[in-house]
């Protein structure tokens, strides 16, 4: 498979996997064994750890939220070796008062010469502490 065909396949896989990442596992065949991941609260390397972070997201989504959504807005090739995904996370926390979460972000995926993702960096539109503050805003939907 040539490089551009591989990129198209990676984009299609991300479009398929990301909207349901809180409900079911993603495909791992588009990532290298030593994938590097970073977001505002986590930083690690390796496909095993990458699998664990997605398992943890699903576990915490079921445990702490009555509803949670990953709204995927776009996935596109932003440079020869970079794919960008824009998204919003929104949900309702499982507490006695109406507590909503909403934040936007984007994921930057860097590809190696084989068209596999070796780096995934998530950027959020606000700090983690600001996101947590939403849980304590009673009766307000962000």
Image (tube, rainbow, N blue to C red):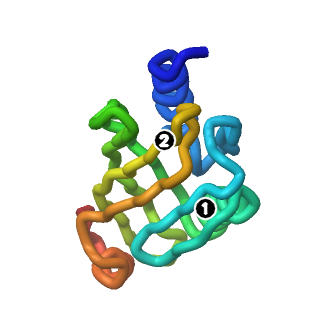
- State the count of labels: 2
The residue wearing badge 2 is 111
Indicate the position of residue 118 as horizontal and vertical percent values. Answer: 55, 50
Q: Residues within 10 Å of mark 2 (few under 14, many from 20)?
A: many
**What is the residue that sits farthest to the right in this orientation?**
48
Q: Nearer the viewer, residue 99 or 77?
A: 77
On screen, residue 102 versus residue 61, left or right, reads left
**Above or below, 104 relative to 44:** above
**Quadrant in which the N terminus appears:** top right
Q: Residues within 10 Å of mark 1 (few under 14, many from 20)?
A: some
**Above or below, 28 relative to 121:** above
Indicate the position of residue 61 as horizontal and vertical percent values. Answer: 59, 61
Q: Give the spatial CA distance, label 2 vs label 1.
A: 24 Å
Q: Quadrant of residue 121?
A: bottom left
Local SS, label 1: helix
Residue at x 63%, y 44% (from the top left corner) = 31
On screen, residue 83 versus residue 29, left or right, reads left
**Quadrant in which the C terminus appears:** bottom left
Indicate the position of residue 2 as horizontal and vertical percent values. Answer: 54, 16
**Above or below, 1 relative to 93:** above
Residue at x 44%, y 62% (from the top left corner) = 92
For discs 2 and 1, the disc positioned in front in the rendered view: 2
Residue at x 37%, y 41% (from the top left corner) = 82
Q: Quadrant of residue 34?
A: bottom right
Residue 44 seen by the camera: yes
The residue wearing badge 1 is 57
Q: Nearer the viewer, residue 138 or 59?
A: 59
């Amino acid at each position: 498979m040539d490089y551009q065909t591989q990129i198209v396949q990676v984009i299609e896989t991300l479009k398929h996997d990301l909207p349901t990442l809180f409900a079911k596992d993603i495909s791992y065949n588009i990532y290298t064994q030593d994938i590097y991941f970073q977001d505002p609260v986590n930083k690690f390397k390796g496909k095993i750890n990458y699998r664990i972070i997605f398992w943890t997201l699903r576990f915490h989504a079921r445990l702490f939220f009555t509803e949670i959504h990953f709204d995927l807005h776009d996935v596109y090739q932003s440079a020869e070796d970079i794919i960008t995904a824009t998204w919003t996370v929104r949900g309702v926390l499982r507490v006695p008062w109406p507590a909503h979460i909403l934040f936007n972000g984007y994921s930057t995926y860097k590809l190696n010469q084989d068209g596999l993702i070796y780096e995934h960096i998530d950027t959020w539109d606000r700090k983690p502490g600001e996101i947590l503050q939403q849980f304590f805003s009673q009766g307000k939907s962000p």
